[in-house]
Amino acid sequence: MLANARREILTRPILSLVQSSLPRLSVTESEAIDAGDSWWDADLFTGDPDWSRLLAVPPATLTAEEQSFMDGPVDMLCAMIDDWRMTWETHDLPQAAWDYLKAEKFFGIIIPKAHGGLGFSNFAHSEIVRKIATRSVSAAVTAMVPNSLGPGELILRFGTKAQQAHWLPRLADGREIPAFGLTSPEAGSDAAAMTDEGVIGKGEWQGREVLGIRLNWRKRYITLGPVATILGLAFKLRDPDHLLGEQEDIGITVALVPTDLPGVSIGRRHIPSMQSFQNGPNEGHDVFVPLDHIIGGPERAGQGWKMLMSALAAGRSISLPSLSAAAAAFAAHTSGAYARVRSQFNLPIGRFEGIQERLARIAANAYLLDGARRLTCAGLDQGHHPAVISSILKLHATERMRVAINDAMDVHGGKAVIEGPNNYLGNQYRAIPVGITVEGANILTRSLMVFGQGAIRSHPFLLQEIRAAGEGDHAQALVDFDAVLWKHVGHALKTAIRAFARSWSGGLFAPAPKAGRATRFYRQMSRYAAGFAFLSDIAFLTLGGELKRRELLSGRLGDILSELYLLSGALKRWEDEGRQDADFPLLAWCMESGFATIEQRFAEVIANFPARPVGWMLRLFILPFGRRRHGPSDRIIRKCAQIILEPNSARDRLVDAIFIGGPEEPVARLTEAFRLMVDTQPIHDRLRKAGVKDWQDAKARGLITEAELAQLEAADRAVADVIAVDDFAPSDLARTGAVPGMAQAAE
């Protein structure tokens, strides 16, 4: 009786209010939310994350077979690549590299051995892409695309048995080169605006009339498109003659289209930020394929967007985060070494605090990104497909990549500005916009997806409430909504108490595992998670559907969730690597920087909250003493910089699995100059103490030996070689083919 009375008196009017105020989900939004699953993000959304659950996740590791592949074929592929020549002369990988990619099954990393692939883990996939990317972004993109969005992964997850048996072995050994056609001139981030169309009808296929689809499309930005032999094509499917059923507009569908069919036009290329991976437009005019070319068969017609989002939840968690982690680690290695060997005012530039500030940020971002990457790969290898986490990682990994490479450019100065074979940073710098833009532009990912979809997908009750409120049967809607509403109310009250208590106590008594020096960081994370959960509930309650349109607020809330996840990855890395004391400055930098960002975003949301009295209340519960965190201390900054300025175990862990190359390679020469400068530092210190600058005079006075003089001269030659930049004769720059169309434009 009491439950019925509550339902009628309290729940019914609340349901009516919710039905009028909650955001209505579009079809694409609904399918995106249904795709993938939630994981650690859901724990963070509760406001009371279970740290034991995080720490119990098995660390991502390589098998002996996977490590052997890293040490063998991956290194061999990297040695084949000349990024300078690819960028400015051939605009493609060398044919030997293409052949090697196929022969060693790089295109079949994720394809099971039963279908002829390597059958490697998600972590191995990530490690392979990461290492190749330290050599060449273009080579890494070429290897990763067939293993991410597909169509290989789509066939593997959704394809029919016949499709898997036919296509997967051919994709694994490179007989088929895949590409995926999604983006069109009319539809970038807004897939619903797609005008590419398929119409159900009859046509001729291999000499007989069959029921199929007549396709017309125009795509662009398609990686591997110019050389693809099989295209996974996304389009809107219609059935105007009702040959499949009563429904005319069936929806977004994905089909396999061989590129040698009549009407398919491929081959022209884009040049994405001067990168040499194959990318270009393609078109199809009246291209006919049978119904069994729909991935998953005719029963999957209209399910394309959900399939894409589900596959993207995994692929986007690996591909661009791996490129970003590679860029940050590469920047840490090269910038630390260069700042150690390059001197100004008779001092290595790494001793200047302005340089140290950048070096510290590079090193800490490298630590943070790899921690988040490893945690996410561990989740993927446990069978999760975390849609929200994939958005967080894609967005913030590529943004931190941008920061790390920009910092590296600043540290290197003119060395990184002058193009030539000896500039090892130029292509990393030019490639930044590619990562920022593809697989969901960062601007929209931040303002619409991370919190906008994350709130619905990861919140413990919100999705259930939205679905209950949208139930067509009003009586059932009331029953379902009542069941979840009061659970949400109880959860919200607990969250409010947690947020208040943890904020006013400074997180002193917030839950934390026994984690040594890092215990205090967990306490603050518990404090901020409670504040985030409380703020989210208040935003849903007071703004309702309006929150969907408040992109500035949504973006800031998404930043808080993102920082909580990234910092979780850093803490997990610290634990998994055995709580290395030498790494603690890196962890401390990450945590203090992240906490400062979280408090800043809290303050911005509170200051801009539309209902001002609510904003005042939020400040009381979340930031009662105002912002107290302002980032890493100068002491931590100096310690982080020192880690990459000298050889040590922390540096080795930070820059592990970077491709150095043979002795004539620019990065190898820098690495050797770094070693020589460190080895000769005691000799320099001795001479400086004696006030002697002339080495020959020092030898004559017996201050150094012949061997030490040779050491000094070898180091001096190595440094001079490293800091030198390229120059060209005018005739070299006038060669045709340097950039397609340049010679014709000059004429």
Image: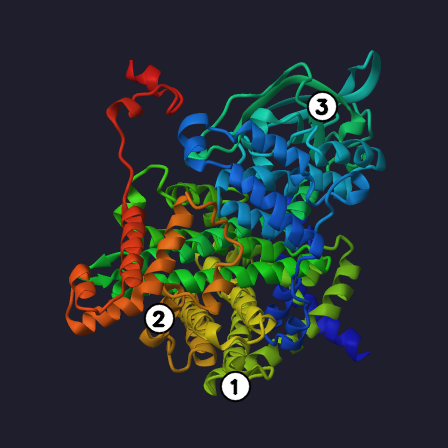
On the image, the x and y values in percent for residue 654 come to 48, 62
Q: Does residue 417 lie above or below 24 as drawn?
A: above
Name the mark nearer the viewer: 2 or 3. Answer: 2
On the image, the x and y values in percent for residue 519 come to 53, 82
> Label 1, label 2: how many angstroms apart (C-alpha)?
32 Å
Disc 1 target residue: 501
Whether residue 18 is visible, yes or no, is no
Residue at 40%, 30% (x, y): give it: 88
Residue at 42%, 63% (x, y): give it: 363
> Label 1, label 3: how many angstroms apart (C-alpha)?
60 Å
On the image, the x and y values in percent for residue 510 come to 55, 84
Nearest the viewer among 397 and 684 is 684
- The quarter of the picture where the N terminus appears is bottom right
Q: Are the residues tagged 2 and 3 within 8 Å (C-beta)? A: no
Looking at the picture, the colour scheme in use is: rainbow
Residue at 82%, 37% (x, y): give it: 160
Which label number is shown at residue 357? none
| Mark 1 residue crowding within 10 angstroms, few (<14) / some (14–19) / many (20+) | some
Amino acid type of the residue that numbered disc 1 sits on in the rendered structure: Ala
Amino acid type of the residue that numbered disc 3 sits on in the rendered structure: Val
| Mark 3 residue crowding within 10 angstroms, few (<14) / some (14–19) / many (20+) | many
Q: Earlier in the sequence, mark 1 or mark 3?
A: 3
Find numbered disc 2 in the image and state the secondary structure of the residue it sits on: helix
Disc 3 target residue: 199
- The quarter of the picture where the C terminus appears is top left
Q: Earlier in the sequence, mark 2 or mark 3?
A: 3
Amino acid type of the residue that numbered disc 2 sits on in the rendered structure: Ile
Find numbered disc 3 in the image and state the secondary structure of the residue it sits on: strand
Q: Does residue 472 lie above or below 739 as drawn?
A: below
Q: Earlier in the sequence, mark 1 or mark 2?
A: 1
Which label number is shown at residue 637? 2
